[in-house]
Image: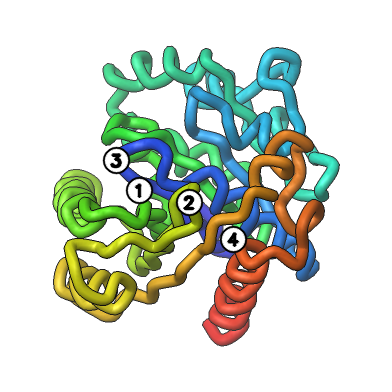
């Protein structure tokens, strides 16, 4: 597939770690910098779809049609109010995962679909479902950067180890997978960064991530903001609802880093 778009997968084994929140708010910050951004909602729960103001029940054709029926991805992409483009999801996508099981290209289905639109975008953000099923694996297989949102609890290190093993299995099976990693430590609803196994949370996690992934892994702290809920309710990125919030400023800094990296190769 064309290499023009930078493909970032947001992935974690469990739900509630901030995958969709981080995906949508980073997409909004990148779009505000004049970048052409596509969000691909690979989660049948369709939270990224509704989080960008699109009702999954009335969106029309979605990723099920692409992955299960071979419809070109360009025919289902929508432009949302925020200016971010969206490949929508719905509960039907769970059925596509079942159908993919018997296909020889089951780990490359998303990569093949993205070939239809990749040259139109500078960033493609993939919101993967929790777990380790085929929809998540398709996201990992096509990504060149993996963003792992972890909650600020004591099991963050263990989840990174599990994800590293999964990536190893994926590379062995397909030779594909992200080359770069970034950890997003997302504060819990009390707005706290709990101790990650005891000790300095971010520094300790960064050291562990470097050991697990075999190299330096950037770690970003994302503070909690109650405005996130209002942004999701309104179907807009956080920067459109509460640009001065600490959480939005953290996503703005992350967008700056990514666009800087993009400019310098």
Within the image, what quadrant is residue 64 found in?
top right
In three-dimensional space, the C-alpha distance between marks 2 and 3, rounded to whole angstroms, equals 22 Å
Q: Earlier in the sequence, mark 4 or mark 2?
A: 4
Q: Earlier in the sequence, mark 4 or mark 3?
A: 4
| Disc 1: CA contacts within 10 A as few (<14), some (14-19) or many (>=20) | many
Above/below status of 234 relative to 31? above
Q: Nearer the viewer, residue 52 or 40?
A: 52
Q: Which residue is mark 3?
A: 13
| Tag of residue 5 | 4
| Disc 2: CA contacts within 10 A as few (<14), some (14-19) or many (>=20) | few
Within the image, what quadrant is residue 139 found in?
top left
Question: Viewer-nearest of labels 2 and 1?
Answer: 2
Q: Which residue is mark 1?
A: 141
Q: Earlier in the sequence, mark 3 or mark 1?
A: 3
| Disc 3: CA contacts within 10 A as few (<14), some (14-19) or many (>=20) | some
Q: Element at badge 2? A: loop
In three-dimensional space, the C-alpha distance between marks 4 and 2, rounded to whole angstroms, equals 36 Å
Q: Which residue is mark 2?
A: 190
Question: Viewer-nearest of labels 4 and 2?
Answer: 2
Q: Element at badge 1? A: helix
In three-dimensional space, the C-alpha distance between marks 2 and 1, rounded to whole angstroms, equals 34 Å
Q: Position of residue 206 (x, y in %)?
A: 28, 75
């Amino acid at each position: 597939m064309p290499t023009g778009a930078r493909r970032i997968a947001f992935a974690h084994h469990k739900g509630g770690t901030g995958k969709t929140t981080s995906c949508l708010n980073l997409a909004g910050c990148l779009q505000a910098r004049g970048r052409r951004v596509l969000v691909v909602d690979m989660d049948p729960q369709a939270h990224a779809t509704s989080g960008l103001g699109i009702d999954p029940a009335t969106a029309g054709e979605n990723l099920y049609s692409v992955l299960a029926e071979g419809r070109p991805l360009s025919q289902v992409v929508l432009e949302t109010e925020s200016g971010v483009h969206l490949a929508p999801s719905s509960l039907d996508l769970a059925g596509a995962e079942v159908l993919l099981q018997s296909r020889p290209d089951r780990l490359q289905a998303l990569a093949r679909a993205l070939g239809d639109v990749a040259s139109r975008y500078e960033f493609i953000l993939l919101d993967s479902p929790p777990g380790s099923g085929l929809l998540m694996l398709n996201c990992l297989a096509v990504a060149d950067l993996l963003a792992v949102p972890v909650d600020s609890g004591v099991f963050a290190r263990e989840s990174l180890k599990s994800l590293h093993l999964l990536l190893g299995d994926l590379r062995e099976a397909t030779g594909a997978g992200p080359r770069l990693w970034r950890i997003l430590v997302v504060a819990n609803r009390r707005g706290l960064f709990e101790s990650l196994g005891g000790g300095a949370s971010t520094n300790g996690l960064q050291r562990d991530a470097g050991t697990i992934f075999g190299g330096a892994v950037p770690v970003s702290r994302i503070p909690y903001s109650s405005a996130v809920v209002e942004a999701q309710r309104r179907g807009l990125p956080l920067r459109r609802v509460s640009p001065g919030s600490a959480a939005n400023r953290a996503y703005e800094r992350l967008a700056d880093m990514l666009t800087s990296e993009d400019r310098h190769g």
